[in-house]
Image (cartoon, rainbow, N blue to C red):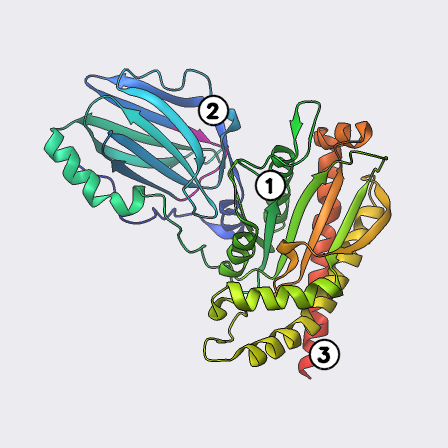
Amino acid sequence: MIRAVLSFVLTLSLAGPLAAQELRALARIVAEDSAARDAGRGAEISLGLSQPVPFRVALADNPPRLVLDLREVVWDGLPEGFDAAEAVTGVVTGAAGLSPGWSRMVLSLDRPLGIETAAMTTDPGTGQARVSITLTPVSAEQFAAMAAADSAIAAPVRSAPAPSAPGRLVVALDPGHGGVDPGAQSDGHDEADLTLLFARELAERLIRTGQVDVVLTRTEDVFVPLPERVSIARGALADLFVSLHADALAEGRATGATVYTLSDSASDAASAALAERFDRMDLLQGVDLSQSDDEIADVLMDLARLDTDARSEALADTLVAGIASSDAGLHRHSRLEAGFTVLTAPDIPSVLVELGFLSDPRDLERLTDPDWRASFQDALVQAILDWAATDAAEAALRRQ
């Protein structure tokens, strides 16, 4: 039996800078090329994609499952009746466990099936890709051995983000809320869903500039603790952190976007809390505080904040200016400060953007309008690039 390569990410051979750029963008499902069909006592799985992406396949046991991971895919276009194969009893899609930047499809199997072939082909005319997997019957013992060999891949464990290309800006996007915490709710809409949709679309626009890599703190409707969101950004060596929200007010009216930075009063308290709650080796990129006492750790974080806070302020001001130049709409108090936990990283410029207010009918209509979101996202993309260019120039002057 010919086994697919299961122990590492399959590398795609693509020509030119454009292909490399597109490889980082979100892929979408091509419904007409996607199906699970019977093939004798086995099955054939086809998954059409808008573009080629790295992928990996594995088997998992108890119960038997096929696990397919791909660099980030939007699953919305998966057709109904995809699991038409008799051997496939169910399909679940989402993020690849806790691995940032990966999407996962899990197919439940009613019998032991081994992977005969797994391959991706690309149409040179359209640029679309297709993942094809052939499953054939094996004994229960053979399946168990294959699943044991693939266990490191199939397990939902955190993996390190892919390294960014040299000179490429790394942006951490944090869709607010998720899972058991839906956030604000209005007229059948949850803040968690709207911010995730906005973050995915914004990520794709950033990536397609060819200058940016993106890590999302969550890629599906799951709960991620607030400190963990900051740790995900730090693990990706993010250059900036943007948290996305769309709040609601029980009383009064508010409309338009607002950009927050961490308040001065919250910064000192946040530094103290971080020193107590986190491993000191995780507090500052490239600075080992594990051998430092509390006083030294506090001083080093204060010094880091002197630089980071100024850069966060500049980022926030640039974002506000960018939003003002679009039709997105600004709140009358467009620049505010607050003690949000997700803004407490002492070494990463961080802002929180309230996209609008679900309690306002006009804002809710805007947030559910793809054209309005696109205009807002374009403004944010340009503002982020403008800030990055200015920040890099100022850093060069400081080094001189």
Asked whether residue 384 is drawn in magenta, I would say: no
Can residue 346 be seen in the rendering of this structure? no
Q: Is residue 128 left or right of residue 56?
A: right
| Residue highlighted by disc 2 | 78
The percent position of residue 105, horizontal first and vertical second, equals: 39, 32
262 or 220: nearer the viewer: 262
Q: Earlier in the sequence, mark 2 or mark 1?
A: 2
Task: Report the residue at 45% width, 36% height from top.
Answer: 124
The answer to whether residue 334 is left or right of residue 300 is right
Q: Amino acid at mark 3?
A: Leu
Identify the residue at horizontal 36%, vertical 19% (top origin). 83
Disc 3 residue crowd, few under 14, some 14–19, many 20+, Cα 10 Å: few
Q: Residue furthest bottom?
A: 400
| Residue 166 locus on image (x, y percent) | 52, 64
According to the image, label 1 marks what residue? 177
Q: What residue sits right under mark 3 in the picture?
A: 397
Amino acid under disc 1: His
- In which quarter of the view is residue 211 placed? bottom right
Circle 2 crowding by C-alpha within 10 Å: few under 14, some 14–19, many from 20: some
The N terminus is located in which quarter?
A: top left
Question: Which mark, residue 153?
Answer: none
The magenta-colored residue range is 47-54
**Could you give the CA–CA distance between mark 2 and mark 3, rounded to whole angstroms?**
50 Å
Check disc 2 and report its element: helix, strand or loop: loop
Where residue 73 appears, as percent x and y from the top left, is 48, 37
Q: Gap between marks 3 and 1, in whole Å?
A: 39 Å
Residue 234 located left or right of residue 271: left
Q: Is residue 313 above or below residue 13?
A: below
| Discs 2/1, front | 1
Image coordinates of residue 334 in percent, x first then y, are 83, 49
One can see residue 162 in this view: yes
